[in-house]
Image (cartoon, coloured by chain):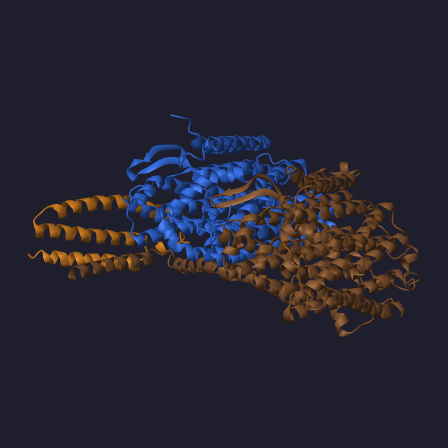
């Protein structure tokens, strides 16, 4: 038996979480370094997965399969396709930056707290989330996936509810109330989605007799498992609802601005760049893979919702007064694009959507983490409290601008490639939808530039006059992200090479062919 | 040779990267790094040009394929360059004028502490602009297209501490994004129609699809061109863009970037040729803009904004020519090049005047400067003669051809377009003479002025390095600034004759754009003569208004038209009321809706569940007997139910 | 004697016990009423056993007695300790364990 690489990739951060939590109270710094090391180790394992994965090989690779709950046919089955590999790599890549960016977020307020333990808890929870996210990407058993899809909520709940921004414009008590409101809202929304999905999971078992993604998909493909149209649709809706909450899709989105607004910036990145990706990933893998017919049936409605998400999220981002909530609404708009790409059911759309998941992770991380650095300096999340920062802290402003430009999909930066692919893929099948979605790019420019103008330009406000520029630790966080944005914008081939075969598979799952051009142009 | 093309883009890109990431260490030499790399790019361009001249006209197009950019199923996007005569023309213009303006900026920005960054942005602009004209497919062109937009954003807002500059930068980017939307829709249409968006295949097989599709593509391309080239209805950003440093206005907002729209139309000639409706719209847009810009230019007292109006108007000529089809493409590009020379020269001259006048931009506070700035006066004067189309100078050759081509369009359209173009020439002569007279002639209004009118926030001094309210001491600018002006003045004088005599330029570009000789309904000589006549008329009228009479230091109220023109013919007010205010209301009400309705439904559900459980809680009163009652009640119901079931 | 009469008696005793549970407050009385109901059930069980001629009902009656005895032990202990702490055997005074 070969080395269980996929298990190791998920188990390492899990063990790391336990070890970090066990570090004695006085050795806070050691806990931080331990967490960082573990996350780097996980990154190394993820890179190994990336290297060992063969784009031209089988659909699911590095598979592991063990019996788990034999009575119900639940198996411990892992396996990755190109999409999962890309997202595992993204997750493993972002966690070290999140840890580094949140280095001081859980420190005791004043020194001398001998028995202060939340620091350990903070980093342990981040690692726990990483472990669960990675295993959700790897699971090819629906039940296994479901367990970790839900279990993720627990550490996320504590991360949102337990750790907030240091200073708050309405005082610590209000902040705590709002935080716990946000955490409970996050939990309830996602639990509701999860419970409906549980019903669908049980329903699937009743119909199919096991939980194995590969087996069910195969049985469906060769006709040995016949599902009544209505059954398939109900099951699809059950799954889709949970993923749409997680993604989040309008009108199930309102938990995200609260959660991202109240959480610290690194946790906000964890939510939107990592955890939410499980939702869109699962749409591709489970909704399209298990219920191709129902997916096609629901496509028009989902496209409309995605379109609303794009425009609505962008318009609301324009109207925000709070930096972090603005980024949250921008993310809602971007998730609209991802879902649009998935359900346009063209190769370009789906490749674009997968690429979009990766690129959005990186670009939001860059923007949000810099925003977090900014907020930690002034102690306010309100846009109106800033002004003229670029004069005082040019590097901070410059990196913020690049993060913003990536968010508005400037060509040359990574998100442009994915956004354009999604638009082209959508346009090829649904021209009107593609054109309306294009309005999103104008609105994106609006909210990003308005944010930049109000915070960074203009006369220097007295409160920001003494603001220090980015520190070394912060630069170490931001610079690689920006480098990646540029690299993947100019040369996205490494990612597309991994993703393309998986997209081809998905396209054949749903039995859709790309629309052909009207004129066969001279080559 | 092919491999040099990438270097053309790489040199300024390297400059931008080094200057922007280099930090303060490079402050001392940054401007030289930027200038040298721009010059390197120009030299490479010249080498390629020499090589191209050595080949036959048909074999001049070369290309370079770097790598596959976005390899996705059924989708092919490459990083690949194409260099033909059209691109070559632009490369020389961009790198040539670009290098001169780099040189000029060394002196102009001498006192700015962020000079290094300024040069970094300029280099970034050059790289993006070169990418735009060298790309061999529309998607890569789009990268350059937005790249120049970004550079323009950064440079307009270079003095970010001024809210007006930051706002102008944002506005420019946003308006351009509307145009970019057109470009991306055009590319998507091409993809679904042709399965590709590389120039070669798309343009070759343009004839195989329906006219409706082509018209849609062409109109979307026109929308993009309107954004970038400040054509009606997306022209509003250009005037505000004058908030940027003057070299930026000269390079980006006069000579190169704003002409990208014309490049796009001419490049897509094969599509436009097959879509006559789109061509008609293009000519109308051009004609309207050329009048719009000219009228605005007549009313502005800010020298840069007057020139910006003029830029709009001149690009209107080019768009008009490009809309005329094969009879106009060559002349559109020819006017573009000559305009690049004289308008850049005029802007640099304006910059030089501002440099000597404590960054004053209000022409009403100039006057009689010819004695103090002889070099500026002469170079500006030559640029002036060139732009109004004084016989023998550059503008004469290029503009006259466009007017001819407009008449040659034929029918009523031809008469209308030609008439508009002639009228535009008259107004051009008027407003440029006005600028000339107000700046260099007349009494010295900058002396002993009682009090400056303080309530003009948009004409406040552009840079902060000098006391703004001291009486200025006009002086000639340093050599690094005058040399570029002199070079450009040479271009303004001789370029037109060089291109025009013997149809050199036509032969040069014909293989790319195609050319048909237009036949105007009246003889070419008549048109030329009437052009000269309206020119004299316009200039004479301006002399009557501003040369014979003293210019008041505070602008008179003026007629209704004047006041409207000062406000950019109210388009900004329209935008403000409809888009800005409307948008604010929309977003605000949406925020409210999100909070109360979308969130409210969920919170309402939660609240009603909470309320219900609050009621239910009352039942738990702690008295054993009430529990017992409910128990007995429940048991009784159960028994009754059982009996009932059995009975049924 | 007709065994049905025993059932009438059982029903009567049960009703008396139930009414007592519902209307009395003294814990001891309540307790006795509960016992009364249990024993009414026992009586009914035995009567049924007799009527149907098998022993099942009688066996269940024994079980009920055992349970009742256990209940008495626990219940009385609770009542005594309650009385000790509150000096009252009224169940209404013990209404504190509510939300």
Where residue B312 sits: x, y (%)?
72, 60
- B193, B330: nearer the viewer: B330
Q: Could you tell me which residue is drawn at 46 percent across and 41 percent down?
A: A500
Tell me if A481 is positioned left or right of A55 in this view.
right
| Residue B302 in sight in this render | yes
Where residue B645 sits: x, y (%)?
19, 60
In the picture, the quarter occupied by the N terminus of chain A is top left
| Residue A375 in sight in this render | no
Q: Could you tell me which residue is drawn at 41 percent across and 46 percent down?
A: A507
Chain for colour orange = C
Tell me if A366 is positioned left or right of B405 in this view.
left
Tell me if B428 is positioned left or right of A253 in this view.
right
Where residue B23 sits: x, y (%)?
73, 38
Where residue B421 sits: x, y (%)?
71, 66
- The correct choice, above or below, for A418 with respect to B551 in the image is above
Give the colour of chain A: blue
Q: Could you tell me which residue is drawn at 40 percent across and 41 percent down?
A: A145
Farthest residue, direction bottom: B559
Give the colour of chain B: brown
- A40, A418: nearer the viewer: A418
């Amino acid at each position: 038996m070969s080395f269980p690489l996929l298990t190791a990739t998920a188990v390492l951060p899990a063990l790391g979480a336990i070890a970090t939590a066990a570090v004695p109270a006085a050795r806070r710094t050691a806990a931080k370094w331990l967490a960082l090391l573990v996350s780097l180790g996980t990154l190394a394992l993820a890179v190994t997965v990336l290297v060992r994965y063969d784009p031209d090989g089988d659909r699911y690779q590095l598979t592991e399969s063990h019996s788990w709950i034999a009575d119900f046919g639940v198996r411990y089955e892992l396996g990755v396709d190109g999409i999962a590999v890309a997202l595992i790599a993204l997750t493993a890549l972002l966690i070290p930056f999140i840890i580094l960016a949140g280095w001081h977020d859980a420190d005791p307020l004043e020194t001398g707290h001998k028995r202060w333990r939340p620091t350990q808890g903070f980093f342990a929870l981040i690692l726990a989330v990483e472990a669960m996210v990675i295993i959700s990407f790897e699971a090819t058993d629906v039940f296994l996936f479901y367990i970790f899809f839900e279990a993720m909520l627990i550490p996320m709940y504590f991360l949102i509810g337990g750790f907030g921004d240091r200073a708050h414009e309405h005082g610590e008590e209000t902040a705590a109330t709002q935080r716990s409101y946000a955490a409970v809202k996050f939990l309830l929304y996602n639990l509701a989605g999860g419970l409906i999905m549980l019903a669908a999971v049980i329903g699937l078992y009743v119909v199919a007799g096991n939980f194995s993604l590969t087996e069910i998909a195969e049985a469906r493909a060769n006709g040995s498992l016949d599902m009544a149209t209505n059954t398939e649709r109900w099951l699809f809706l059950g799954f889709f609802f949970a993923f749409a909450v997680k993604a989040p899709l309008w009108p199930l989105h309102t938990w995200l601005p609260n959660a991202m607004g109240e959480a610290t910036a690194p946790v906000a990145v964890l939510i939107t760049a990592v955890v939410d990706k499980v939702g869109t990933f699962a749409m591709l893998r489970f909704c399209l893979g298990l219920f191709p017919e129902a997916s096609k049936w629901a496509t028009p409605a989902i496209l409309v919702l995605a379109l609303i998400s794009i425009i609505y999220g962008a318009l609301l981002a324009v109207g925000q007064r709070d930096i972090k909530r603005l980024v949250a609404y921008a993310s809602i708009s971007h998730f609209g694009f991802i879902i649009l790409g998935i359900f346009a059911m063209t190769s370009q759309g789906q490749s674009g959507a997968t690429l979009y998941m990766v690129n959005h992770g990186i670009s939001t991380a860059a923007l949000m983490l810099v925003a977090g650095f900014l907020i930690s300096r002034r102690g306010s999340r309100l846009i109106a409290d800033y002004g003229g920062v670029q004069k005082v802290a040019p590097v901070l402003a410059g990196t913020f601008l690049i993060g913003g430009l990536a968010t508005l999909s400037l060509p040359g930066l990574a998100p442009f490639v994915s956004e354009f692919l999604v638009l082209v893929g959508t346009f090829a099948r649904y021209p009107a939808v593609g054109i309306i979605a294009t309005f999103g790019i104008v609105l994106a420019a609006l909210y990003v530039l308005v944010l930049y103008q109000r915070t960074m330009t203009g006369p220097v406000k007295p409160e920001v006059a003494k603001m220090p520029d980015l520190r070394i630790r912060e630069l170490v966080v931001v610079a690689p992200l920006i480098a990646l944005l540029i690299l993947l914008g100019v040369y996205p081939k490494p990612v597309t090479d991994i993703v393309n075969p998986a997209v081809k598979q998905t396209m054949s799952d749903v039995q859709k062919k790309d629309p052909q051009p009207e004129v066969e142009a001279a080559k | 040779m092919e491999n040099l093309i990438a270097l053309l883009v790489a040199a300024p890109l390297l400059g931008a990267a080094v200057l922007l990431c280099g930090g303060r260490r490079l402050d001392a030499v940054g401007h030289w790094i930027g200038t040298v790399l721009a010059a390197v790019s120009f030299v490479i361009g010249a080498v390629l040009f020499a090589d191209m001249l050595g080949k036959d006209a048909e074999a001049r197009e070369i290309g370079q394929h770097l790598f596959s950019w976005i390899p996705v199923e059924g989708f092919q996007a490459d990083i690949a360059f194409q260099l033909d005569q059209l691109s070559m023309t632009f490369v020389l213009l961009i790198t040539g004028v670009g290098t001169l303006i780099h040189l000029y900026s060394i002196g102009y920005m001498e006192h700015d502490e962020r000079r290094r960054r300024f040069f970094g942005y300029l280099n970034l602009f050059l790289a993006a602009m070169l990418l735009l004209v060298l790309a061999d497919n529309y998607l890569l062109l789009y990268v350059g297209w937005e790249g120049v937009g970004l550079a323009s954003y950064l440079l307009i807002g270079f003095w970010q501490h001024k809210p007006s500059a930051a706002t102008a930068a944002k506005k420019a980017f946003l308006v351009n994004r509307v145009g970019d939307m057109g470009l991306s829709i055009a590319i998507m249409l091409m993809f679904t129609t042709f399965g590709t968006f590389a120039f070669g295949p798309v343009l070759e097989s343009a004839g195989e699809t329906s006219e409706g599709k082509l018209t849609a593509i062409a109109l979307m391309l026109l929308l993009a061109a309107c954004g970038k080239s400040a054509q009606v209805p997306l022209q509003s950003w250009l005037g505000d863009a004058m908030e940027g440093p003057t070299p930026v206005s000269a390079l980006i907002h006069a000579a190169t970037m704003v002409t990208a729209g014309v490049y796009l139309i001419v490049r897509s000639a094969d599509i436009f040729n097959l879509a006559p409706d789109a061509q008609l719209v293009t000519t109308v847009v051009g004609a309207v803009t050329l009048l719009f810009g000219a009228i605005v230019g007549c009313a502005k007292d800010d020298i840069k904004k007057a020139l910006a109006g003029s830029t709009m108007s001149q690009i209107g000529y080019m768009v008009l020519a490009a809309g005329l089809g094969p009879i106009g493409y060559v002349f559109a590009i020819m006017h573009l090049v000559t305009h690049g020379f004289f308008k850049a020269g005029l802007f640099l001259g304006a910059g030089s005047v501002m440099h000597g006048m404590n960054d004053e931009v209000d022409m009403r506070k100039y006057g009689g400067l010819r004695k103090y700035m002889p070099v500026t006066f002469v170079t500006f004067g030559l640029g002036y003669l060139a732009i109004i189309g004084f016989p023998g100078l550059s503008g004469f050759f290029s503009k006259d051809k466009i007017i001819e081509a407009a008449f040659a369009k034929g029918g009523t359209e031809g008469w209308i377009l030609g008439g508009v173009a002639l009228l535009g020439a008259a107004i051009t002569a008027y407003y440029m003479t006005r600028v000339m007279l107000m700046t260099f002639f007349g009494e010295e209004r900058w002396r002993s002025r009682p009090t400056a009118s303080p309530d003009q926030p948009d004409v406040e001094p552009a840079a902060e390095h000098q006391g703004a309210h001291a009486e200025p001491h006009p002086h000639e600018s340093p050599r690094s600034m005058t040399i570029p002006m002199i070079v450009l003045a040479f271009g303004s004088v001789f370029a037109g004759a060089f291109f025009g005599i013997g149809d050199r330029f036509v032969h040069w570009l014909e293989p790319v754009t195609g050319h048909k000789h237009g036949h105007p309904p009246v003889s070419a000589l008549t048109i030329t003569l009437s052009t000269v006549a309206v020119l004299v008329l316009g200039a004479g009228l301006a002399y009557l208004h501003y040369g014979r009479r003293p210019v008041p230091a505070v602008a008179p109220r003026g007629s209704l038209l004047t006041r409207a023109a000062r406000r950019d013919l109210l388009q900004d007010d329209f935008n403000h009321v409809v888009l800005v205010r409307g948008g604010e209301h929309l977003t605000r009400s949406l925020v409210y809706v999100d909070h109360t309705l979308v969130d409210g439904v969920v919170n309402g559900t939660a609240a009603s569940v909470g309320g219900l459980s609050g009621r239910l809680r009352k039942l738990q009163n702690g008295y054993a007997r009430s529990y017992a009652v409910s128990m007995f009640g429940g048991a009784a119901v159960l028994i009754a139910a059982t009996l009932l079931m059995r009975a049924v | 004697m007709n065994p049905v009469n025993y059932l009438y008696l059982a029903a009567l005793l049960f009703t008396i016990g139930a009414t007592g549970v519902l209307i009395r407050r003294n814990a001891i009385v309540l307790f006795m009423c509960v016992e009364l109901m249990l024993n009414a059930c026992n009586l009914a069980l035995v009567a049924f056993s007799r009527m149907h001629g098998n022993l099942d009902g009688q066996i269940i009656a024994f079980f009920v007695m055992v349970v009742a005895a256990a209940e008495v032990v626990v219940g009385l202990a609770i009542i005594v300790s309650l009385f000790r702490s509150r000096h009252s055997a009224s169940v209404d005074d013990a209404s504190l364990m509510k939300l």
